[in-house]
Image (spheres, helix red, strand yellow):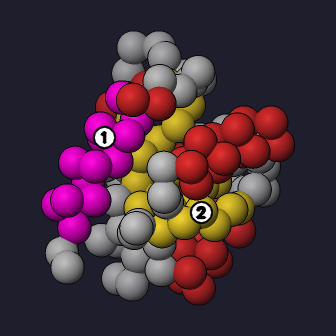
Amino acid sequence: MAKILLVEDNEMNRDMLSRRLSRRGFTIVLAEDGLEAIHMARTESPDLILLDMDLPVLDGWEAARRMKADEALRKIPIIALTAHAMSGDKERALDSGCDDYETKPIDLNRLLAKMKTLLEGRPG
């Protein structure tokens, strides 16, 4: 099953989502801030990244930009996870390099469908 890098600074959100994804067979690796996310993406080679955008140290917007600028990381799909549901926030996430966008609270079925689409589109 796919390896997912879950980047979330809120412990309750991180634990809840990681458990729900683990139960569905995904291998989960965790990061709590944007710099740690970049490091974990390099060392763990995840198949997909779920990236909270409101992170300490380095926010998700900048972390996504840096990962997509990195030759070794740019092909890893990123789904932005954010409570930002204002007009333009989806476009901002996509402009940062995210491949898709999901608002919080997370609708797990919708998120799983987006993950499936991105994982199926990855080169083998």
Report the side of 77 relative to 20 (left or right): left
Residue denoted by label 2: 28
Report the side of 96 relative to 26 (left or right): left
**What range of the chain is rendered magenta?**
110-122
Residue 66 location, x and y as percent?
49, 67
On screen, 68 above or below 95?
below
> Disc 1 or 2, which lies upstream in sequence?
2
Front position in the image: 50 or 21: 21
The disc placed on residue 114 is: 1
Of marks 1 and 2, the one in the foreground: 2
Instruction: Tell me which residue sits at (20%, 59%) in the image.
Output: 120
Whether 46 is among the magenta residues is no
The answer to which image quadrant residue 20 occupies is top right
The quadrant in which the N terminus is found is bottom left
Residue 14 location, x and y as percent?
72, 44
Instruction: Tell me which residue sits at (39%, 84%) in the image.
Output: 72
The quadrant in which the C terminus is found is bottom left
Instruction: Tell me which residue sits at (70%, 38%) in the image.
Output: 16
Can residue 68 be seen here? The reply is no
